[in-house]
Amino acid sequence: MSAKTIVTTEALMKVGDLPLGLTVQPGSTVDFKTGDWRSALPVLDREKCSYCGFCYVYCPDGVYQDMGPEKYYKPDLDYCKGCGVCAHECPKKCIQMVIQEV
Amino acid sequence: MSAPKGKSDSARAIGLEVSLAIAEAVKLAEAEVVAAYPITPQTHIVEHLSELVANGELTAEYVPVESEQSAMSACIGAAAAGARTFTSTSSQGLLLMAEMLYIASILRLPIVMAMVNRAISGPINIWNDHSDAMSVRDCGWIQVFAETGQEAVDLTIMSFRIAEDPGVLLPLIVNLDGFTLSHFIEPVILPEAAEVRRFLPPYETAHKLDIQNPLSLGALGGPEIYTEARRALDLALTGAKPRIQRVFDDFAKVFGRQYKLVETYRTEGAETILVTMGSISETAMTAVDEMREAGQKVGLVRLRLWRPFPVEEFRAAVAGAKNLAVIDRAMILGFPEGPVATEIRALLYHEKNRPHMTNFILGLGGRDVPRSHFKHIVERVRELGASGRQGRYELVGVLE
Ligand code: SF4
Ligand code: SF4
């Protein structure tokens, strides 16, 4: 190209490297870190938590991990989109949605 | 544009309604899934297909869906499972199906659809023009226009071969004019089943849903990939052109009927060339014959392939003409020319020796197109050419 101004691109992949029909391999959503959509972060008060598992069950993205003997649940922040459902459903009101500064 | 002529001795023309002949062609192609919703004037095709399936003459899954949107969705599912898939629609049905057309092409699923061209309402109208086809011009499907019943049959059979070509893998629309072609009884040669099977072996593909080899179809494509995805589809569609001609050539070797992407009729030394698509080309050719007999240097160029547009073939076909009369069977509301003319004018913009060109719109909503229309058009395009005026459509036979 002879134009002086360089065009920047946010493209993820070259045209020629795209799979036929844009198919996606199984299990590949693991690489798709939806956590960066988040504007608020669930912060859990372990002292108040009764280990009832509501957050684990209600989270639409299934990001809560059972901490077992630790007796509480922990969100995987790579995939938590910050919807606040867990905080709303927690019977102990021990999850706070904290706005994240960018 | 040769008359039906079969290589094999057993090939004999029979009188058949073109819609039924297309259904028979789908049977010969051994389609495995047909999902369709009846709409005038396409109804006879899918009606006959459902009969063929019910009678056991065609071993296929016939899915009588509740809408065209579902018809195309079912076709997408079937094609994604690796089945040879067929459907058919017209006009309003096409509009209801439209959103799914774009999905079929980006997923590269080789569905074949007969589009029996009918005007888009309103006012409510069931008769023929090309406004339905033009409304989905950019859906990413290969699109061809048939002129005769024989051509519609042959194109239907070839369509599966083209669409399923591993170097193509795109859905394909066979356009044919509603009523004026679909409901006519024409002499048609139905090829021998064994020969069709040799020409069109069963569809085998690795590009399908398979529990042994799982994959997902239809994932999100955000800003970081959408541009590249659209470019890839455009390259696939444009790149299909030589392969389409190759299938036409292979068909000629087996069945003796040779098709081209762009057909020319008496264009040698023609000063004025008519450009048409679809069944009115038959009437136009008769008009050309009459004008040639009267000593006028008139010829005809017919686009069989509409998408991908056969750019080089079209340029070569009209080279040397002084006047081009481009016929449209649809309008672009709010723009000075119809869809076919707009594209052709854009293509000719870069030519050193551009012909004079005028766009004539006719045959809307089933209005009859007699030979006299073409004679009027030829006189008119010459007149406008001589005066150097061009650039607005003329609506032939409009009362205002
Ligand atoms: S905020 Fe939403 S996504 Fe994040 S852990 Fe709670 S429920 Fe799950
Ligand atoms: S819903 Fe609240 S109380 Fe129950 S486990 Fe989750 S954080 Fe603890």
Image (cartoon, helix red, strand yellow):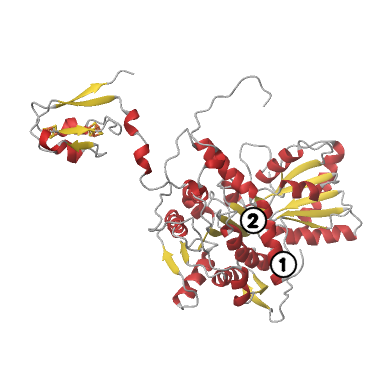
- The disc placed on residue B252 is 1
Is ligand 1 within 8 Å of the beta carbon of the residue shown at mark 1?
no
Q: Nearer the viewer, residue B195 or B393?
A: B195
- Label 1 resides on the chain identified as B
Is residue A6 in sight in this rendering? yes
Q: How many dots with numbers?
A: 2
Query: Could you tell me if the residues under marks 1 and 2 are in contact, i.e. CB atoms within 8 Å?
Result: no
Residue B286 point in image, percent of width and height: 79, 62
Q: Amino acid at mark 1?
A: Ala
Left or right: A59 with respect to B125? left
> Ligand 2 falls in which quarter?
top left
Q: Quadrant of residue A83?
A: top left
- The disc placed on residue B105 is none
* Residue under numbered circle 2: B144
Q: Nearer the viewer, residue A97 or B122?
A: A97
Left or right: B107 with respect to A40? right
Q: Nearer the viewer, residue B362 or B310?
A: B310
Crowding near the residue tagged with mark 1, few <14, some 14–19, many ≥20 C-alpha atoms within 10 Å: some
Label 1 in the same subunit as label 2: yes
Residue B43 point in image, percent of width and height: 51, 65
Q: Amino acid at mark 2?
A: Val
Q: Quadrant of the C terminus of chain B?
A: top right
- Residue projecting furthest to the top: A101
Q: Which residue sits at x=78%, y=42%?
A: B357
Please, what secondary structure does the residue beneath circle 2 have?
Answer: strand
Which label lies toward us, 1 or 2?
Answer: 1
